Amino acid sequence: MSGADRPAIRFRDVGQRFPGADGRAVTALDGLSFDIGRHEFVAVLGPSGCGKSTLLRLLAGLIRPTAGRVEIFDTPVTEPRDDIGIVFQKPTLLPWFDVLSNVTFPMRHKYGRVTPVERERARELLDLVGLADFAGRRPDELSGGMQQRVGIARALLLDPDILLMDEPFSALDALTRDEMSFELLRIWADRPKTVLFITHAIPEALLLADRVVVMTGRPGRVREILPVPLPRPRTLATLSDPAFHDLANHIRGRLFSRPVAA
Ligand SMILES: Nc1ncnc2c1ncn2[C@@H]1O[C@H](COP(=O)(O)OP(=O)(O)OP(=O)(O)O)[C@@H](O)[C@H]1O
């Protein structure tokens, strides 16, 4: 592999054990290996408790693996990095700041101030996520979907190469969730990023991703890595593509360990 196409993210034989409350260790991840290419969109699907969030925290440098290696551009992850943006399930906006100040918050937090150039950049990002007219509003004046858009703009502020998304749309109603998926695809086409997207939803994973990593139950291991050969740009028509349904059924079969009555 040449330098240009070396993976952006590399998990090699990663294991993660946590001390349990009763003194017995919990193995969250075991022998997990896969790579993510630069500007690739990878979704991770798996049953509850299989270690998806742990995977994301390892990449974010919030914890260190107890076995194996986690690397970004060939460098082991040892601490949080500026070239990673994170979007969580809840947007965690600061209620006393307006929308613009929430987007610039990473700068204020890191450097203690926000320059006019950065403020302008935040305005551009608000425009990108469709909130140009809401810069002066408080978070509680926004719908859930709008708040999550603010979270996405904030994650993009430092122009990270890598975007980590931990079930970012799961708290939204079904319609808003679909709308946000298409929004994310539009933003990703405009600002290509390497994306690791954690979800419980098979259709969401297939609509968004280049590849889907299907995990086993705890301890989390890679059950299968499935390429998603559906053409881009993905549209509403993608959802009714027979190939989309075949892929969804295939993943369902992988996730359900016991047969389900037809
Ligand atoms: N800091 C911790 N200390 C102890 N155990 C932990 C810790 N963090 C995670 N775990 C355990 O590791 C396992 C994996 O947790 P994790 O949150 O990564 O799973 P998940 O796949 O994201 O779950 P969900 O889909 O329900 O959000 C769980 O059994 C969890 O209880």
Image (tube, rainbow, N blue to C red):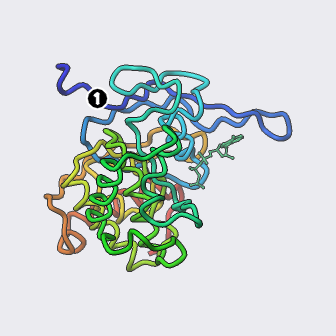
Residue type at mark 1 is: Pro
> For this view, does 250 lie left or right of residue 49?
left
Q: Nearer the viewer, residue 73 or 198?
A: 73
Quadrant containing the C terminus in the rendered view: bottom left
Q: Position of residue 48 (x, y in %)?
A: 58, 55
Task: Give the SS element for disc 1.
Answer: loop
Residue that carries the numbered disc 1 in the rendered image: 7
Residue 90, percent across and down? 54, 62
Q: How many marks?
A: 1
Q: Furthest-right residue in view?
A: 22
Q: Does residue 55 sit above or below 3 in this rendering?
A: below
**Does 54 sit above or below residue 209?**
above
Residue drawn where x is 62% and y is 38% of the image: 28
Relative image position of residue 54 (x, y in whole percent):
57, 41
* Of residues 200 and 75, the one drawn nearer to the viewer in this rendering: 75
With 102 as the anchor, is 127 left or right in this view? left
User: Residue at the location (34% across, 55% down)?
Assistant: 122
In the image, residue 18 above or below residue 151: above
Nearer to me, 197 or 151: 151
Seen at 38% across and 27% down, the residue is: 72
Q: Relative to the observer, which residue lies in front, 9 or 253?
A: 9
Q: Quadrant of residue 250?
A: bottom left
Q: Residues within 10 Å of mark 1 (few under 14, many from 20)?
A: many
